[in-house]
Image (tube, rainbow, N blue to C red):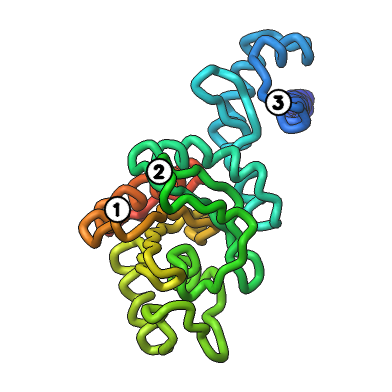
Amino acid sequence: MELIVATQQTGTQAVDRAAELLTHVVEAAGPRTFTSLVEQTGLAKSTVSRLLQALERHRLVQRDRSGVFRPGAVFAVYAARQGVGSDLVELTTPTLERIGARTGETINLAVPRGDAVVQVAQVDSVHLLGTTNWVGLSVPAHCSALGKVFYAFRTLPLPTGTLERRTPRTITDRTDLERDLATVIRRGYAIAREELEPGLVAVASPVRARDGSVVAAISVSGPTARITDRRAEQIGALLVTESAALSSILGHTVRTEGAA
């Protein structure tokens, strides 16, 4: 009996210490260093290191390249689902910037809200032509690449009523839209070519949480003069790769056929 009680106390103590560390990281105004956490908790370095590793494994904290600690992917997923985008934006910024550097075009991060698509972050194009600040703007989902992603994977309910025609290339027939969404699922990314605005092309891919649900989408957009059909395919392949890597940070793993 004494052994059982001692084990329970030790386990509770470990939970309390881990919770204390997590609280210090989450409530801090900025990233926390390992040294500052050791000093604030008064715990041994080996204990702090062991607890932080456990918190990292469960995606409750994350360590960046400089070695500092910040809230982990679990909080970003919660933020995406609850309408608080700051954690998700912070987590995805390196990915958005990397895609921007690879393409030179405008990069956007969007999340679903009710029946709408909300763009919460943007990396501007290196080109003057085609640069628009889309953050906070509301656009019809059926004629945007981001919206098609959320429709295709049923994160947003399919639209009812008449589909607004924004350009001569906007899809307004429901059968055609369903056919286009099936293509999105098959290839893993959506394309909207001059469907929202004349001369504008956008490509988007889904970001998944641990359970496989699509919690966000990333898009690359620019003028038709630069994003040709061939380049759109190349950007789509890039987005699929980058979105998969980002999804893995959020805990999503792709199951191979035959996996248990």
Labels 2 & 3 near each other (Cβ < 8 A): no
Seen at 68% across and 20% down, the residue is 32
Amino acid carrying mark 3 in the image: Gly
User: Depth check: 131 or 25 in front?
Assistant: 131
Q: Is residue 210 visible?
A: no
Q: Label for residue 226?
A: 1
Q: Quadrant of the N terminus?
A: top right
Q: Is residue 164 visible?
A: yes
Side (left or right) of 103 relative to 218: left
Seen at 53% across and 56% down, the residue is 216
Residue 54 versus residue 37 in the image, above or below: below
Residue 88: x and y in percent read 60, 45
Amino acid carrying mark 1 in the image: Arg
N-terminal of the pair, mark 2 or mark 3, is 3
For mark 3, what is the residue? Answer: 30
Residue 107: x and y in percent read 46, 48
Residue 250 versus residue 31 in the image, above or below: below
How many other residues sit within 10 Å of disc 1, few (<14), some (14-19) or many (≥20)? some
Amino acid carrying mark 2 in the image: His
- The CA distance from mark 1 to mark 3 is 39 Å
Of all residues, the one furthest to the left in this rendering is 230
Q: Label for residue 127?
A: 2
